[in-house]
Amino acid sequence: MASEGKKKGVPALGWWLMLVGSLRLASVWFGFFNIWALRVAVFSQTEMTDVHGRTFGVWTLLTCTLCFLCALNLENRPLYLATFLSFIYALGHFLTEYLIYQTMAAANLSTVGFFAAWHLLVPSCKMARGACCACCICSLTDDENRNVNRMDASSVEFSWRSPVVPML
């Protein structure tokens, strides 16, 4: 009986998202209050104004909020998808800043790119221990998710197969 009232712990994915959200808070601080540190740590190949720093801070605060909300609500598919997409957008942003605009050094890209790429490369929904997000990995590998009769209107299905992430 005592085990029935026991709360479930936070899955590994939730802890990962809280870690990333906490680290993003540091970038928010730098964007608003220490633009020099943001310039040295991220955009070392360009000039940054205070407006650029605050814009980066607000954008990072939004992604930080998504990380914390998703960490505490892994079963919420739309929230998970929005958080997952924020990692794709962040990686795309940093890659274009490095490859096209050349505002970042390779060392800076490797640091910020690690957190964006890690979330995309690791089959994160499997880390959620049963709180499946119906992402492309699960939708393509789990026969239960393919059963159209069991799906509701809020299901998210992708027909894309990732060349990077192995199918489990």
Image: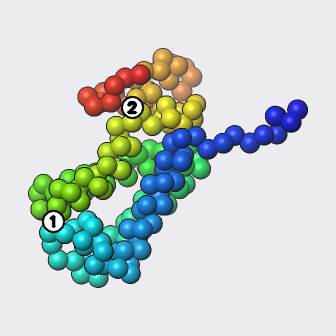
In the rendered view of the protein, which quadrant contains the C terminus?
A: top left
In the rendered view of the protein, which quadrant contains the N terminus?
A: top right
* Element marked by disc 2: helix
Residue 164 pos. (x, y %):
28, 31
Would you place residue 35 above or below residue 134 in this image? below
**Does residue 40 appear to the left or right of 29 in the view shown?**
left
Residue flagged by tag 1: what amino acid is it? Thr
In the rendered structure, are the residues bearing label 1 and label 2 in contact, judged by CB atoms less than 8 Å apart?
Answer: no
Q: Residue at x 15, y 65 (%)?
A: 103
Residue 130 pos. (x, y %):
58, 31
Separation of residues labelled 1 and 2 (CA atoms)? 33 Å
* Camera-nearest residue between 2 and 82: 2
Q: Residue at x 43, y 26 (%)?
A: 139
Q: Is residue 67 visible?
A: no
* Camera-nearest residue between 157 and 90: 90
* Element marked by disc 1: loop
Q: Quadrant of residue 48?
A: bottom left
Q: Residue at x 54, y 27 (%)?
A: 151
Q: Residue beneath label 1, please?
A: 103
In the rendered view, how is the structure colored? rainbow
**Does residue 85 appear to the left or right of 78 in the view shown?**
left
Q: Residue beneath label 2, please?
A: 136
* Camera-nearest residue between 54 and 139: 54
Would you place residue 159 above or below residue 7 in this image? above
Q: Quadrant of residue 58?
A: bottom left
Residue 159 pos. (x, y %):
34, 28
